[in-house]
Image: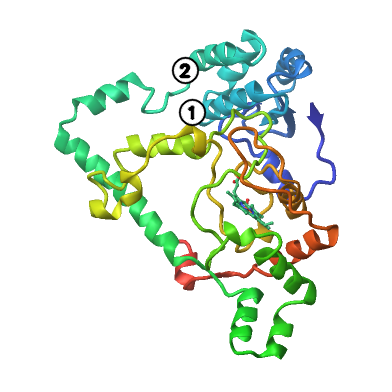
Amino acid sequence: MRVIFAGTPDFARAALETPFGSSWKGAAKPQVVLVEFFDYACPYCKASNPHVDQLLKENPGLRVVYRELPILGQDSVEAARLSLAASKAGRFREFHDALYAAGRPAPDTNATAARVANIPPTPVQDPAARAAWDAMNSGQRDAVNRIFANLGKAIAAYERRIMPGASRFDAFVEAAIRRDTNAMEAALTSDEVAGLRLFIGKANCIQCHSGPLFTNNAFHNTGVPAAKGLPMDVGRLEGVRKVLADEFNCLGRYSDARPEQCGELNFLAADAHTQARQFRPPSLRNVAERAPYMHAGQFATLEQALDHYNKAPAAPQGHSELKPLGLTDRETAQIVRFLGSLSAPVNAEPRWLAAP
Ligand code: HEC
C-alpha cells in the first residue's frame, strides 16, 4: 500500500517520515522518502517487496520508511509486534525479508522470522538471562527484587497525589448541601440533573459506580462483548490466579502491609463460575474525555456504552449482572449529558505535573 503525503502538515509529515528504530531501507541521507504502510499478510505488500528492493538499488537517494498497519487479523498483529521488536534491536530488514520468505504470518512463520532476525528474547525467555539470575545468591536476588518493588511503590505513591479536580457535578452537590438553588442551577443544566436522577434511580448505575470516584472497586460481569481479533480475556479469573502466585502480592516479603491488612488475599480463590469476565468498574470522573470505552475499547462512544446498558445482552462468557433498563432515547441522552458534567482538570501541585 503506497501513500504520497502531498499537502500533509509539516509536523505530521516529519513524524511519518522518521522511522521507528531500524524500520527503513535505502539512503542514510535521503533526497526522497517514501512511506510504506503494510501488513505482512497482504499479498500485494509481499509481491512488491523485491520490486521495492530493486527501486532502492536503482535510486541511491531514495529511502523507504516502513509503517506497520496490521489490519488482516491476529497473526498480522503478532507479526507487527515482532517486527517492532526487531526494529528496536536494529534488525528490521532481517525480520522483514525473513517473514516474507517464510510465508503468511502465523505462529510458525512468525517464530521462524524472529529466529532468523535473532530478536533478543525477554529476560524470562532468554536462557542466558535465566542462568545469570540462577547464578546469583539469594541476597543478591533479594536486593534486585527490593529495588523492583520500591520502583512500583514510588510510582503508586506519585499517582496518589494526582487527584481529579472539582467538576460542575461537585459544585452542584455543594450547592445542594447549602440548599442554594441558584448555584445548583448554575452548576448543571436541567438535562444533566435529569441524567443524575436516572443514574441513581431508574438506571441504577450507582449500584457499581458509587462513592467519590464513582466506583465500588468490586468486580462485575456486565456482558461487555469480546474484543474482535484478540484472545478471550477471562478478566478477574486470570487476575486472581496471577495475584495468588505473585511473590510481590500483599502477603509477599516486599509488601508493607501487615498480614491482617491482606484480608481479600486470604479468602481469594479462582472460581470460574463467578469470576469469568468480571472487570472492575473504572472511575467515571473525566469519562467523557477518554473514549473508547471498556477494557479493550469495545465502544467508541458513550452513546454506544449506554445502548449496551439499556439492552443488557448476554455475556460472551459467564453471566451478565445487567438487566434491560427500558430507557428512552431522551433518557440515555440525559445520562450521557450527566456524565459530561464529571469532567474537570486534574488537581495537583504544578511540580508534580512537570518533568523532574
Ligand atoms: C453491575 C455493575 C455495573 C453497573 C450497574 C453499571 N456499570 Fe458501568 N461499568 C461496570 C464495569 C465492571 C465496567 C468495566 C467493564 C469493562 O472494562 O469491560 C464499567 C464501565 C463503564 C464505563 C466505561 C468507562 C471506561 O473508562 O471505559 C462507563 C461509561 C460506564 N460503565 C457507565 C455506566 C452507566 C452510565 C451505568 C448506568 C446505566 C453503569 N455504568 C452501570 C460496572 C457497572
In the rendered image, residue 250, in percent from the top left (x then y), is placed at 30, 48
In the drawing, does residue 205 fall left or right of residue 191? left
Quadrant containing the N terminus in the rendered view: top right
Q: Is residue 188 left or right of residue 346?
A: right
Residue pointed to by mark 2:
118
Give the residue type at disc 1: Ala
Quarter-of-image position of residue 55: top right
> Visible in this render: residue 200?
yes
Please tell me the numbered disc located at residue 89: 1
Structure colour scheme: rainbow
**Mark 1 element type:** loop
Quadrant of the image occupied by residue 247? top left
Q: Is residue 156 above or below residue 134?
A: below
Crowd band around label 1 with a 10 angstrom C-alpha radius: few (<14), some (14–19), many (20+): some
Q: In percent of the image, x 69 and y 70: which residue is there?
A: 341
| CA distance separating discs 1 and 2 | 9 Å
Identify which amino acid the numbered label 2 is placed on.
Asn
Q: Position of residue 106 (x, y in %)?
A: 61, 15
